[in-house]
Structures are given as structure tokens and as C-alpha cells.
Image (spheres, helix red, strand yellow):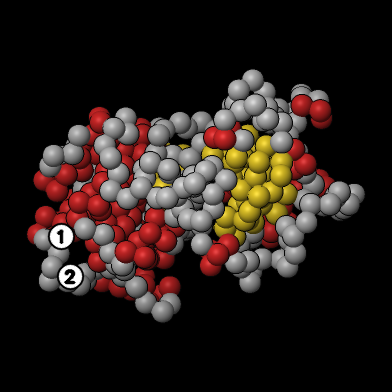
Amino acid sequence: MTDSSFTSDDHTHDDESDGDKLKLTDFDVEDTLGTGTFGKVLLVRYKKATNQPDALKFFALKVLRKTEIIKLRQVEHVKAEKFLLSRVRHPFIVDLYATFQDHLNVYMLLSYIPGGELFSHLRRAKRFTPDVTRFYLATIVLALKYLHSLNIVYRDLKPENLLLDSRGYLRLTDFGFAKYVEDRTYTLCGTPEYLAPEVIQSHGHGKAVDWWACGILTYEMLVGYPPFFDETAFGIYEKILRGRIHWPRDIDPLSRSIVCELLHPDLTKRLGNMNGGVSDVMNHPWFRGVDWDALERCEIRAPLIPYVAGMDDTRNYTSERRMPSPRNIPGMFEDFEPLPPPDPFDSTALEFLDF
């Protein structure tokens, strides 16, 4: 490792010699943390960090298959994820330390967040109390405040993309759908249950979609399931546009209030998107008593502190989550033997990823 740590721009410049660039053989693969449509996330140990603390030895390595990226038309999303993550630094956002590539895959070296997905903790708890929900939503509000100040719209807020660190604080991960947007964009992307009406209707969307997603997430944390769900994506979209929310009797009025204000279909009336911006969210009565500055300094004890034996502990990433997806190519990352020569018909197309 160069000096004491990587920086986001290390090993990514074309003018570096091959000897200075990271490669897969610089790491020992310890475990698989998760799988996706065109890649995996691995827990890896950096071999050269012999005298470094564990936090600088173990990383999450996101491995994306180039052929799948191209086939699924995700090139721009992958490039945007690298570009945006390399430029943001916030205590509630995962860190990108380096990127590199070979002719088969592109790699993103990320901080390893050992507490696992909020999704898993929520499923085990069934639902969270308003106080627990408030703590998690407040950290997300601060992360979005930071991103929106840079005109970055996240666009994929959901429990699966929220990781708990060893202190129990959330870290936002997976910036594949994030985008720099000054006004509005028209790309349809995201998770069906979390899509805002303006995305479904192709009216163009901006930062307001993240506040809508906060409303969906808040409801899911409080109730245990999202407010709009169906067996098909089309059915979900119909319910979102209809806008009817069923409330269990035990949900308090203030919790209902903030969810309904975040889920307002009228953009001019949606909490977070009015003249006061994020201040309207932070000043909502539901957040009364929150010390926002202390929270951002991580001085407030988290409601759930995951058990972590060490930085190589993967117990909070369940075996169910690590099972290979049927959409993945069999054997895609099963071994790390020397790579075969690149296909001359693919080489030009695959190098434009610019990692």
C-alpha cells in the first residue's frame, strides 16, 4: 500500500507504469459478501499492508464483469459510480479507495462495512420503533443533504443499500444509479417499490425522488414492509400512482405526518423539495430533539450495534445474501487463475470503461 492508505485516485491514471497499478493478485479473497446481476462483492485482504491496522488491510472489492456491463447497457452507470464515489467524502457514505481493471472485469476497492445490510437487521426485527427509525433516517438525511449540495441525486435508496458500520451507523453504498443533475433527468431506474410518481410517468425528475424514497423507507422501517407492493412491477406502479397508504393502528400521528409529507405526489408540496429544502425535513416535529451536529460527528450511541469480532468478520452478511444469483454466469468468479489472452474482437469495446 502506498504510504498509509489508498486515495480515491490511486492506480487509475494512464501514465502509471504497470508495476504501480493494483491488480487482483495483490489481494487474498476472504469471502463473498454479496452477488448481483453482473458482479460480486468480495471481502479481500491487501497483501502488502503487513504493518497496517486491520481497517487498512481488509476491503470490499466490487467485481463487475465487462461483458455483462455492456450487454445490460450499464456502462454509463458504472462510469458514473466511479466518478461520483471518487469525489465524495462523508461519514455516512462508503469510501472508494481505488479502481482498476483487467480485460475481463472492472474493480472498485471500497471500505468494508462489517455490520451488514440494514435490510437483514430489519427483517430480523420485523419492524423498528420510531426512535430507531428516527436515528437511521436522520443519518440518511445528512448524507442526502451532502450529496444534494453537490447536485448528486442518489436514486436508489432502500434497506439493501444501507450498511451498518461497527459503531452501528449507516453507510450509503452502491452508487450505480447516482447521477449529477442540475435540473432534471429522464432515465427510468431504481427499485420499483421506491420509485417516485414522476419517474414512473417520465415527467423528468431530480432531487425530490430521494425525498420520496425517504418516505418509502421510513414507512418500511416502521411497519415492516413498503407502502406500495404487488406481485408485478406494473401493479406496484399502479398503486404508487393511486397513492393510497394503509396505516396500522399503532403508528403515531407524527410518524404518519412525516411519511405523508415525504410521499406527497405534488413536487411543490413534497417535504425536502420546497423552498426550505432539507431544512424543512430537519425541522419537522418528528425530528424534535435530534442533535444534528453531534449525529454527524458520530457522537450519539447507535440503537443497534452489530457484533463484529474483527475487520475480517462476515457473520453479518448472511449466507442467503451470498448465494450466487441465477442471473450470474456460472463460475464467473470461482477462481483467480492467470487470465487468458483478451479476445481481439472485444478489446476495443471493453477498454473504453476507463478505469
Percent of width and height locating residue 242? 26, 71
Picture layout, residue 47 above or below residue 120: above
Residue 80 visible, this angle = no
Crowding near pointer 2: few (<14 within 10 Å), some, many (20+)?
A: few
Picture layout, residue 105 above or below residue 233: above
Percent of width and height locating residue 76? 60, 47
Which residue position is annotated with label 2? 247
Tell me whether the residue at label 2 lies in contact with that at label 1, contact meaning CB atoms closer than 8 angstroms.
Answer: yes
Picture layout, residue 239 above or below residue 352: below
At x 36%, y 65%, the residue is 124
Q: Nearer the viewer, residue 70 or 97?
A: 97
Q: Nearer the viewer, residue 81 or 99?
A: 99
Could you say whether the residue bearing mark 2 is in a helix, strand or loop?
Answer: loop
Toward which corner of the image does residue 240 lie, by quadrant?
bottom left
Percent of width and height locating residue 270? 22, 51
Which residue position is annotated with label 1? 256
Toward which corner of the image does residue 232 lie, by quadrant?
bottom left
Percent of width and height locating residue 354? 70, 38
